[in-house]
Structure formats: structure tokens, C-alpha cells
Image: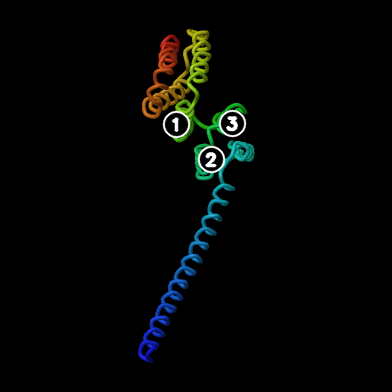
Amino acid sequence: MSPGRGTTAGLFSATICVKVLATMKIWIRTGALLAALWAVAAIVIYFAKSSQPTAASVTAYVHSLNMDALQGSDRARAIERMENMVNRISFDDRQALDRGRVNREFFDKLTPDEQGAYLDATLPTGFQQLMDAFNKMDPVKRKLIVSKALEQMKENEGNGPPPGAVQSNIEQHVIDQGLKSFYRDANADVKLDLAPLVEQMQLNLEQRQ
């Protein structure tokens, strides 16, 4: 091999080594950056989950409040926090609150105007969760639930005195939001299954007027 060829080969090898080392440095830096990003993401996910409200944390919050003593901005902040917590809990947790009457306990402490605003703030999410649950539910199970609800509504047909102004306002909020979600969020099969329930609900309301 001539000296010129040896020098050329050496320079070529050196160039390759430099490029390989440079590439390795880039990958090492990229790997370190990705590791840092994943670490940040893991921390964010951890704190997001730990701050996610549950039925238990909402119950604890309601029981910690003395709504009779809260006035002005303090009262408004307490109601707003409750709205935010209720809108962030899962459908199952929301049902647990209803079964434990925690939501009702808080609601009854509000003035009529506050009740209307609270319903407007929390009902859309609640009905959307309900429609999502119906959309995903096994059709046989859904039909069974609707059948039982329809039977119960027919038993209550014409029962009860006409609602007062406050109760009528509450019912109207619930009906308006429920129907909006029904027509917006329910799929075709759910609309078909729930149609008799909606018709019976309207009939019951008309007979109470």
C-alpha cells in the first residue's frame, strides 16, 4: 500500500469515528431529554390523579362546610368549588353521591337562585355521563332498566300535588338539560329505547299541572 493511500484511509476512518461520536452524543442528549420529559409527565399524571375528586372527597368537603355561615364571595367560592368537584368525578362516584344524598344535602342549603345556577353548572356533565353510560351499556340491560323505570313512572302517574314555583323551576332545569343531552349525546339505539320513558315523563308532568 502506498503512503498516500494509507493516509487517505486513515483520514477516512478518523472522519467516520468523528461522525459516529457526534451521532452518539446527539442520541445521548435526545435520550436524556426524553427521560426528563417522561419524568415530568409521570409527576404531572401523579398529581393529576391525586387531585382527582372522588365521592369520598366530595362528601368530606360538603361535611366541612357551614353554608349557613358563609356569605358573599366566600359562599360563591364554596359553591363554585363544589360545582368543579362534581363535574370532575366519575359517573359511578356521582351515583354514589346521589345514593348517599350528599349532593341533595348541599343543594338544599342553597337559595333558589343559587340552586338554578348550580343545576345549570352541573347537570350538563351529569346527563352527558348518563348518556355515555347508556350508549356503552348492553342493549338487554338497557331495555331492562328502561322497563323498570317506565313501570315506576306509570305507577306514579297523576300522583302528587302540583309543584310550587321553586320546585317547578328545579324540575324545568332538570327536564331542559336532560332533553338537550338526550337529543345531543344519545345514539340512535338509545334514543329508540328511551323514547317511551321521555313520553311518560312528559305525560306525568302534564297531569300534575
Which of these two is toward me, 44 or 139? 139
Tell me the mark number nearer the camera, choosing from 2 and 1: 1
Sequence-earlier tag: 2 or 3 = 2
What x and y, as percent, mark residue 87? 49, 38
Mark linked to residue 85 = 2
What's the colour scheme?
rainbow
List the residue tagged with mark 1: 128
What x and y, as percent, mark residue 149? 51, 15
List the residue tagged with mark 3: 97
Packing grade of label 2 (10 A; few <14, some 14-19, many >=20) is some
Distance between mark 2 and mark 1 Cα atoms: 16 Å
Specify whether 10 is left or right of 145. Answer: left
What x and y, as percent, mark residue 59? 62, 36
Which of these two is toward me, 128 or 79? 128
Q: Which amino acid type is marked by label 3? A: Leu
Q: Secondary structure at mark 2?
A: helix
Residue 42 location, quadrant: bottom right
Q: Residue at x 52, y 8 (%)?
A: 155
